[in-house]
Amino acid sequence: MYRDIIYQALRFVFLVILQVFVINQMLQYNLINPFVYPLFILLLPVNTSFFLVLLLSFAVGITVDLLQFTSGIHASATVFMGFLRIYFLKASLSKENFEKNIKPDIRDKGLAWFSVYAIVLLFAHHLVLYFLEVNTFREFFFTILKTSLSALASLLLVILIEYLLMPTSKKQ
Amino acid sequence: MQQFFYFFIRFKIFWVFFIFEVISLVLVYNNSPFHKASFINTANSFTGGIYNSANKITSYFHLRQINDSVMAENARLYNNLYRADSLTHHSDTINFKDSTNKYIGRYVYTAADVISNSTSNRNNYLMLNVGAADGITKQSGVVCNEGVVGIVYDVSEHFCTVISLLNSNAHISAKIDSSNNSGTLMWNGKSPLLAQIDDINKHVKVVPGQTISTSGLNYIFPGNIKIGTVLESSIDGNTNRISIRLSTPFETLYKVYVVRNLDYEEQQNLLNSIKQ
């Protein structure tokens, strides 16, 4: 129990640092602008209570907001993503999965399922994020293009991070 | 009453989501300057220390680049010094335009390190490691060796946040060097290398390659600081759309200067009295 909380806390810190101090410093393009910190919310165990999912979504979003001086847009986008996650898991997982309290990751559910899960939620997150950032529908098609390309880039990075961080002994 | 509670409990996930979303959206859309400033101020005190210690490590990697740019700046200043020297000796033979007399204002430069920066958002901000303790005030200009960077937005004790030129809220008064026609510089969010001016009269002839610099008209920047060069211009109805290649390398910005106009308040007070 306590091990799990410490593990999640470390993941929170690692992903935020990776996002703000590595990815934001190296991958700065105006069209492709990936975000990997939502992986923290994606990988929470399936039995995490809905309140905790939304609270943690808000927490990770507002942390990134404070680090990037963007008042509230990351928090809004991540809370929306957390909300969708609850229903996506209810619709796509069997009762057995909930009883075993699996983690919605590549090891437990396979690459194909995880890719669909991640791309849907990342796209929703990026869509809210970029529309709130631009704050107008005038640049509609540019924003949609930016959202799609960034979501694809985020998906690649998220899968890469998952493979890198997967415990080697349990990989088979 | 029971029905009422039942209604809440039945959609409890939605209501919790709703509450968190409203809190975030209030933060986003609260446009009152007080709230915006207090968010940035919290961010200032929360992140200033973090960015500062990160900067202490990463700054070593750029030392060579910074050295080169300081040497180039030194050389430029030596050249000016030499020219000023020779002018005092032969002032009867050389006709020169003195840019410092044109706009009377006293500007103070303070050197600063960029400790956080972004170029990929729609609204970009920078953070510098100087603050109120170093005499920095709001609405000071920020420049680097190559050109204009932005305007100081908020100041805490040891840090300040800067609205980058790459921000939809940055409006900097610019002019075409050869003709002195001035307009407002804006950024459309597409590329950190380009900015736009839309409000120069369409009868003004604009040629690619012309230099754009600060006009000195809004009292934040001194005049004649380079902004960039004209890339192309096209007339669209009644507006003259000018695209400008910025001379400031926003993606690799480490050392900047804060320019403070000592007469700013006095000038603004005069302007305000006209408006009233």
Image (cartoon, coloured by chain):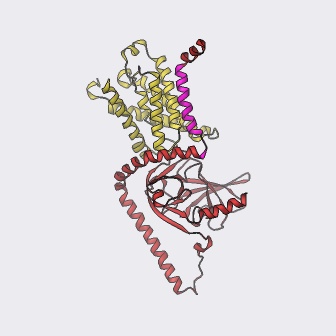
Chain colours: A yellow, B red
Main secondary structure along the magenta-highlighted residues: helix
Q: Which residue lies furthest to the left in this view?
A: A169
Residue B46 in which image quadrant: top left
Residue A13 in which image quadrant: top left
Q: Which of A151 and B270 is in front in this view?
A: B270
Q: Which of B267 and B50 is in front in this view?
A: B267
Residue located 44% across and 21% down the image: A49
Give how far across and how far down residue A78 sits, in percent.
Answer: 49, 32
The vertical placement of B230 against A125, above or below, is: below
The vertical placement of A41 against B52, above or below, is: above
Residue located 43% across and 22% down the image: A113
**On the rendered structure, is A61 left or right of B96?**
left
The vertical placement of A100 against A38, above or below, is: above
Give how far across and how far down residue A39 sits, in percent.
Answer: 42, 31
Residue B217 appears in view? no
First to last magenta residue range: B12-33
Q: Which quarter of the image is occupied by the C terminus of chain B?
A: bottom right
Q: Which quarter of the image is occupied by the N terminus of chain B?
A: top right
Residue located 56% across and 85% down the image: B91
Q: Does the magenta stretch include residue B15?
A: yes
Q: Nearer the viewer, residue A143 or A70?
A: A70
The vertical placement of A35 against B99, above or below, is: above
Give how far across and how far down residue B120 sits, in percent.
Answer: 50, 46
**On the rendered structure, is B142 left or right of A107?**
right
Q: Is residue B119 magenta?
A: no
